[in-house]
Image: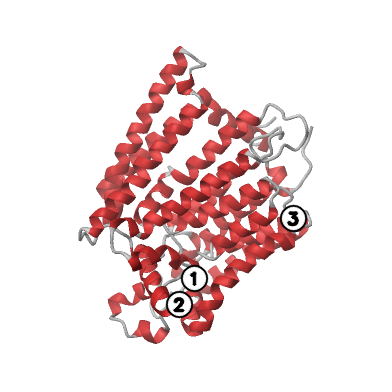
Amino acid sequence: MTADDPTARRWHWRALDTAAGGLALDLGLYAVSALFAAITAVTSTLLPHRAWGAVAAVGYLAAALAVVVQLLLRRRTPTSRLAGLPARWTVTALTWVSTALLPVIWQSVERTAGRTDRAQEEVLVVEHAGTRLLEHGTPYLGPDAIAALPPGDQLLGYTPYQPGMALFGLPRALIDTWWTDARVWFAVGTVLALALAVAALRRAPATTAAPAAPQPRRDAALLRAVQAATVLPICALTLATGGDDLPVLALCLLALAFAAADRPGPAGIAVGLAGALKLFAWPVALVLIVWGLTRRAGARVAAGAIGLPVAALIPALLVDRDALVENVLRFPLGHGLVTSPAQSPFPGHLIASALPAGRIIAAALLIAAGVAIAVRLARRPPRTAVATALICGYGLLAAIALMPSTRFGYLLYPLALLTWAPALHRPTDTSAVPTLDELSGRPTSA
């Protein structure tokens, strides 16, 4: 076995992930996260981020100290329950409360008290969309209405989301208090979807009548996946300061959990709900439909995956078609009245801004990546939830890298999807970490 063999890399990751019963990587995660939060508190130019960092750094540090205690207990008593998997789940939950939920509540309370620097612009956009939905039947302003706004307010006039996102702004439209902040409801939606996903995976039927030893390893992989979707700084920071991506991500993870449990109908409904919130879920829906076709359940997946987003679009289309097109299509494609501020220095943005005809080149590269994924799906469609999650994760990673307008925060999607994949193995699987052979469809060696 050579050092660059995929199997060798798989075992290297497994050795790291399971060192000291998983506690070694827990300690690394919380320690590095504490450092990241502290640096954010001191250096970030975004005031909501600085406020998050000041609170989260303490939460991550406390979690790291808790893991140190667990390591000492494990060294003294290897079978100690305080160092086992349930205790790790408890530390993860408390860490999420202290680094994501507490900052959400704190910033929401201060914002209600008059602080204008306690929310990112997307929070205001979603809440304004909720108000417009309640008053006019559509969350979108038309191009003429946006053009009539002062130049400094035109960006906030856009709602570059699918119509369902406005539902998170409805509470604020009804009552102006801290618990109607859109981030509070983003957190509620995220927790509900992730709880359902964990329950679905734990109830997933075994592939044979004789469950084998990998079940504990699968449970540990599930914990690691939940950590990636909750306490990882890119997720905790996003929820505390903006938050709109987290319920979308959680619903996509729920859809994959239903796929792993061989429940194509609910999988389609979950990803359809995500697609009714944001376009980022649509590629996941496409791959899940292809997965459904391999199980003769494509129509059941598509009914929810396509039907729900279309149903959400119809009312907005009937009320004001021009407003829908301006917000959902023209603005994200860079043809709106103002330019999107999403300009993180990924390859697509660098090409679009630095080369002659760079936007065309970046678009061509993005289309080429999409064609390559489509060919992969046609030639070797994913037959397992694991392969589906991997294709979604790598596909979104390529898209984020090549899009002319993008954000570092969007990386939470591929990171969570790729980390989620090992937890999707059925209880009797012999491997908790997928190989490149599983992704490509090549037969594995004995």
- Residue type marked 2: Thr
Q: Judge the density around disc 2: few (<14), some (14-19), many (≥20) Cα neighbours within 10 Å.
A: many
Q: Quadrant of the N terminus?
A: top right
Q: Position of residue 12 (x, y in %)?
A: 59, 31
Where residue 381 is drawn, which disc sits there?
Answer: 3
Q: Indicate the secondary structure of the residue bearing disc 2.
A: loop
Residue at 36% x, 71% y is: 128
Q: Nearer the viewer, residue 30 or 198?
A: 198
- Residue 190 in the image: above or below residue 314: above
Residue that mark 2 sits on? 138
Quarter of the figure with residue 64: top left
Q: Residue lying at the far left in this picture: please name it.
A: 114
Question: Which quadrant of the view contains residue 15?
Answer: top right
Disc 3 residue type (three-letter)? Pro
- Give the CA distance from mark 3 to mark 1: 31 Å
The image shows residue 103 at horizontal and vertical percentages of 31, 48
Residue type marked 1: Pro
Q: Which residue is mark 1?
A: 163
